[in-house]
Amino acid sequence: MKTISVGGLTYLPEAKALLAIKPSRDIFKDPTEIKTIGNYEIVPWGEDNNTPANVIEKLEKSEVVSANLEFNVLVGYGTGIKPMRRIIEDGKLQGYQEVFDNEEILNFFEDNDLSGYLLEQMTDLKTFYNIFPEIILSNDKKKIVTLRSKEAAFSRWGKMDKKLGRVTKHYYTSKWGDNPKKEDITVSDVLDRFNPLADLQERIKAGKIKEPRFIVPISFPTPGRTYYQHAYWWSIFKSGWYDFSIMVPEAKKALMKNRFAVKYIIYISPKYFEKLFIEEGIDRSDKEAVKARIDQEHQNFSDFLTGSDKAGKGLVALKEMIHSTSGSKEEKYIEIEAIDLGKEGGEFLDDSEEVSNIISYVMGVHSSLIGSTPGKSKGSFSGSDKRELFLMKQALMKPFRDRLLRPLSLIKRFNKWESDIVFAIPDIEFTKLDDNKSGKQETLNE
């Protein structure tokens, strides 16, 4: 049977069906073995040690996911990191005032591009729930002079030291997906995550520092994770809603471009053909045999969906139970969905609206703030309602900001900056014009 490839999908003319291979959801499967490169014992991030790159590839394919993630990063940034001094009167905290008179701190901020550092760290924290800030000591080891953001996508933890009960090594390279060699990897020591200051001071006192640079381990905790966190919003990948969201525009584009009549969409798990090839003894490296078997299966689908004799019949479809810490769920290898095309040009609009709302809900982005809902125009919130929604979103950023600012607390104490100085990420608060002619003012969340 002749098939037509359209936008990454396969069109079966006889059955008037689009066949879509579901992307695999195994990229988040935890590894079972330590990866050894030379004498480095590295904990893989995901079964293929490439989970960050897989996540990046996925988010780049979805305008909804990309826009939501950018929104979360920008809200988290606020007005940037600022050094603030506590104002205390009669033993009570009265407020905060931005520091302009400490040249050492101001130079540190300027020399280290703290605004760029914040954007990099907030991006990694909201995307992966893991960040890898690096501090570098002065030559005399009396000051921390540099604060850098190490890319989470290029970072891996070493195997936990059983005696110390924590990770002590950080490995860094951009070549994790290409089987890197030992010489491609940069190694750094990792400070104790509970008391990094005492750990650093003890190392200096004992003279055990080979390289004057250290990683400060920071993460946003999620249940049951030891080395790498799994961001809560990654549930869109595991549930299948993300897969569906990127199939909708492909299918719609194929229909509009080629004017195909489509009655069905067939969703197939990549495991379906893998299992088929194993059971029938087909070598995956034999391209002709693989193609012939896939073409035969396409014909089988077409035969099932066409002709009057299919009425009342069923299709044998494989499925398996996927086990996790939260229980088990059923994964079907084949799903056939009948399509109600309705008005020409309006195919899948309701589906697109539903999946966009679900993804935005999971990522904590209200559609009234970012305009994430496609389809027909909906009723809108008032300006006051939107302002309150935005204030709620800003307030929910505090736990992420607290985690991100932790290295600066270490630097302040090690460099012996004034004890009344704290670091904060103030917010821009939108006001009514009768309260403030500019419509905005700055607020400090401490």
Image (tube, helix red, strand yellow):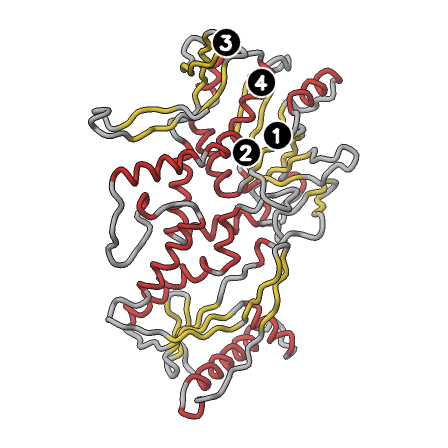
Residue bearing mark 4: 144
**Circle 4 SS class:** strand
Local SS, label 1: strand
Three-letter amino acid code at the position of disc 3: Gly
The residue positioned 33% from the left and 66% from the top of the image is 348
Q: Are marks 3 and 2 in contact (CB under 8 Å)?
A: no
Q: Which residue is mark 1?
A: 215
Report, in whole angstroms, how far the alpha carbon at label 4 lies from the one at label 2: 16 Å
- Cα distance, mark 1 to mark 3? 37 Å
Instruction: Give the x, y percent position of residue 443.
Output: 37, 24
Gap in Å between the C-alphas at discs 4 and 3? 31 Å
Of pointers 1 and 4, the one earlier in the residue sequence: 4
Tell whether label 2 touches label 1 (CB within 8 Å).
yes
Residue 354 visible within the image? yes
Q: Which residue is mark 3?
A: 91
What residue is shown at x 58% (from left), y 11% (from top)?
416
**Quadrant of the snapshot with the N terminus:** bottom left
* 346 is higher (above) or lower (below) than 360: below
The residue that label 2 is drawn on is 150
- 198 or 222, nearer to the observer: 222
Position above or below: 371 against 219:
below
Residue reaching furthest to the bottom: 309
* Distance of label 1 from label 2 (alpha carbons): 9 Å
Asked if residue 114 shows in the view, the reply is: no
Kind of residue sitting beneath label 2: Lys
